[in-house]
Amino acid sequence: MMALDTVDVKRQVRVMMIDGGHRVRAHLNTLGIHIGDWLTVVERAPFRGPVLVEINGTRLALGRGVAAKIQVEVDGALQPLVRRAPESETEQR
Amino acid sequence: MRFVLAGQPNCGKSTIFNSVAGYRAATANFPGSSTTFTFSRALILGREVEVVDLPGIYSLTSSTEDSGKAEGYLLEESYDLIINVVDASRLGRSLELTMQLLELERPMIVALNMMDEAARHGMEVNHEKLSRQIGVPVVPTVGRRGLGLKELFRRALQHAHQGEESFALTLDREVEEALEEVAELLEANGFGNSVPRRFVAEKLLERDPHFEREIYAQHPELKKTVRGVASVLQKAHGWSADQVISGSRHAVAHCIEEETVTLERPRIGWREWADRVFLHPWTGGPVMVAILGLLFWVVFRVGQRLEVPLVELTDQLAAALAEKLPPETLLGTLAGGALNGIAGGVAIVLPYLLPFLIGLAILEDSGYLPRIAYILDNFMHRIGLHGKSVLPLILGYGCSVPAVLSTRILESRRDRRITAFLASFIPCSARTIVIFGLVAAYMGPWWALGIYLLNLFVVVILGNVLARTMKGASPGLILEIPELQVPNLKTLVAKTWLTLKEFITIAWPLLVVSSIVLGVLEWAHGADAVNALLSPLTVTLLGLPAAVGLTLVFGILRKELTLVMLVQALGTAHLSAVMTDGQMLTFTLFVVFYVPCVATIAVMAKELGWRDTAVISAFSVVLAAVIAVTGRFGYALFFS
C-alpha cells in the first residue's frame, strides 16, 4: 500500500483507505472517491503541486496534502482489505 | 406553481434555468459558479411557473461549513417539483445525489443533461431504463444547445400536476434495518412526516450536525439510542456509520449506472490534447502566463483604438457646448457636468470594459479557470491558502462583488476570510479602467503591467501575513476539473450584456449625477471646502492637485467615477496637460488600493461581518497611502 501522492503518472490504482477526518472523507466520497474505487493518476504538478486523477470519467485535482491521505494499491495486487479499528472522530488538521 | 432546479455543481442547472428565464443567472464552466438562489417567473406552455435555480450541492450532507442553504431550501420551503439536473457523463456520482433527493419524497423529475459530453466519453445512457430504475421520469437534454428542454418542461408540468411523490431506493439490508429502527423511534417520539422520517433517521445516523442539533435539542434522550444503532452498523462493517451509508448508496448508484450505460471507446479529441498542454508540468505554467498576457494585451490594444477617437469627439462636443452655454452660468455647469458624465462613460469606461468583460467571460466559460487553480495550487500554498482560492481572486479582476461571494466555494471559514480580504484588493474592472485610461494611455502599457505586478506582489505579502496570523487549517485542494468547452457565442454575448447592463443602468446614471453634483459644487465653490479638508492627504502627502480630493470621495461609490470625475474636476479630457506622469502614477496607485467600493463593502459585511469589513476598509486607506507615497517618491527618484 502506498500514498496516492507517490504514485507515478498513468498508473491505475485502487483506493484502499482514506485517512483523515470525517469532513475530508465525506467530501471525497461526494466527489466520487470511495474505498475500492479504481482511479488513474493523469498528471502530477511539479514542486509538490497537486495530483490530477481521473475517476469514473471525472477529473479531480487533489492537493498533495489530500493525496497523501489516500492510501492506494497499484495494479491489481490486491491484498485483503485491512480494516482499521473505528476511532473517535478527530478532525485532521 | 414552483419548480426547483437542484443538482451537483457544474451540471448545467443555471444553463437550463437561463433557457426559460432569459439570461439572468451568470453561468460559467467551473464548479460553484452560482452561489446564490435565482428566481424567475417563466411561461411554460401557457402556464406561469416560478423557477428557482439553487447553488450546486454534491450531496445533502455537504462538507462545506455553510453551504446548508440549498439543502435548507429543499427541505423546508414549499415547491411543487424538483427538477434534478444530472450530468450524464458523471452519472454514477450524480445518482448518489439523486438518490438522496428521492428520499425527500417530493414530486421529482430528472433532466439527464450533457448527453453530448457523455457521448464523447463513449457513454450511451438508456434513459428509459434509468427512469424505470429510479421511479421518476427522465428526460435527456443538452442544455448548452437547448436540446430536449421543451420536452423537459412539458414533462415537468405534467408530473407536477399529477403530484406523484418519489420514493427512496432500497440500500443495504443492514442499513435499511438501522434506518427503520431510528425512524420508528422518531415516530414513537411524535415526529411528523413533514420531512420524511427515513431521511431524518439517515441524517442522524450520519451525524449531520444540523439535524443532531435540531432533534437532540428537543429530545436529548434519543441521542444515546441513535448512537447505539450507529455503533451496531459500525461494528458490522468496520467503518463509521456515515461511511457505511455512503458506501451503500455508492454501490446502488454504481449498479444502476452499470445497468443503464453502454460503454464504448471514448473519443480522444482536441480537449484531451489541449489538457495535456495546459496541465503538463513543463508547459502548463508558461501557457498560463501567455494566455493571461494575451488577455491583457488585447484589452489594452482594443481599448486604446477605441478611446483615442472617442475622447477627441467628446472634447469637441464639450467645446461646442461651452460656446453655447458658458460654464460660468448654472445652466452651463449642469449641462457640462451631464455631458462629462455621459462622455466619460462612452469614451473612457466602455472601450476598456467591453473587451475585458468578453475576455473574462471566455476564460470562465472555457473551463480554463479551474486549470489555473491546479497550476497555482503549489504557489497558493506558499501564501497559506490552496488552489481553489485562485478562482475568487481571478473573478476579482472582473468585479469584487462576485469575487467575495464566490469565496463560498472554499471549505473553511479561515480560507474564506483571507481570500475575501485579498480579493477586495485585486483591481476590478472599474480600477482596471483607471489603470488603462490613465497609466496605460499616458505612460504606456508597461507601466500598467507594472501596477498589476506590484498589486499581485502586495496581495501575496498580505496573504502571507494573514495566513500566519489567522489560526485554523486549510483543508487542501479538492477540485473538480470540468471538461474544456468552446465558449458559446450566444452565452458570451448574454453574459457580457448582463454585466454591461449593470454598468449602464447603475453606474452610468451615477456617473452623470455625480458629474453634475461635482459641477454644481464647483460652481458654488463648495468643492473647495472638501478639497481643502482632504488636502493634507492629496496635496501634502501625495503631491496631487487639490481638485482630486472630491473625486476620491466619489470613487467610494464606484471606482471608475474617480477617472471620469477627474476629467470634470480638472476641466479637460487631456489629462496629460494638467497632470505629470508621476502624479498619474501616484493617483492610480492610491485608487487601486484605497477602500473597496460601496457595493463590495456591502457584500463583505454580509459575508464577513461589519467588524472585519471596517478593519479591511480602514487598513486599505493606510495601505493605499503608503504605496502611493512610495510610488510618488520612487518615480521622482528614478524616472524624472
Image: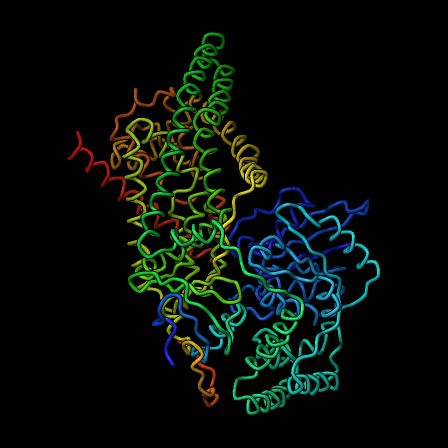
Location of residue B412 in the rendering, given as x and y in whole percent from the top left corner: 45, 65
Question: Which residue is most to the right?
Answer: B162
Q: Quadrant of residue B303?
A: top left
Reply above or below: A86 against B214: below
Q: Nearer the viewer, residue B221 or B62?
A: B62
- The residue drawn where x is 75% and y is 75% is B193
- The residue drawn where x is 66% and y is 80% is B171
User: In the rendered image, is residue A30 in sight?
Assistant: yes
- The residue drawn where x is 72% and y is 60% is B138
Q: If the image is split into quadrants, where does the C terminus of chain B sit?
A: top left
A56 on left or right of B7: left
Q: If the image is split into quadrants, where does the N terminus of chain B sit?
A: bottom right
Reply above or below: B327 against B351: above
Q: How is the image coloured?
A: rainbow
Q: Quadrant of residue B131?
A: bottom right
B300 on left or right of B14: left
Question: Which residue is most to the top?
Answer: B323
Location of residue B296 in the rendering, given as x and y in whole percent from the top left corner: 37, 37
Q: Nearer the viewer, residue B37 or B22?
A: B22
Q: Nearer the viewer, residue B163 or B370?
A: B370
Location of residue B385 in the rendering, given as x and y in whole percent from the top left corner: 37, 61
Location of residue B283 in the rendering, given as x and y in whole percent from the top left corner: 33, 51
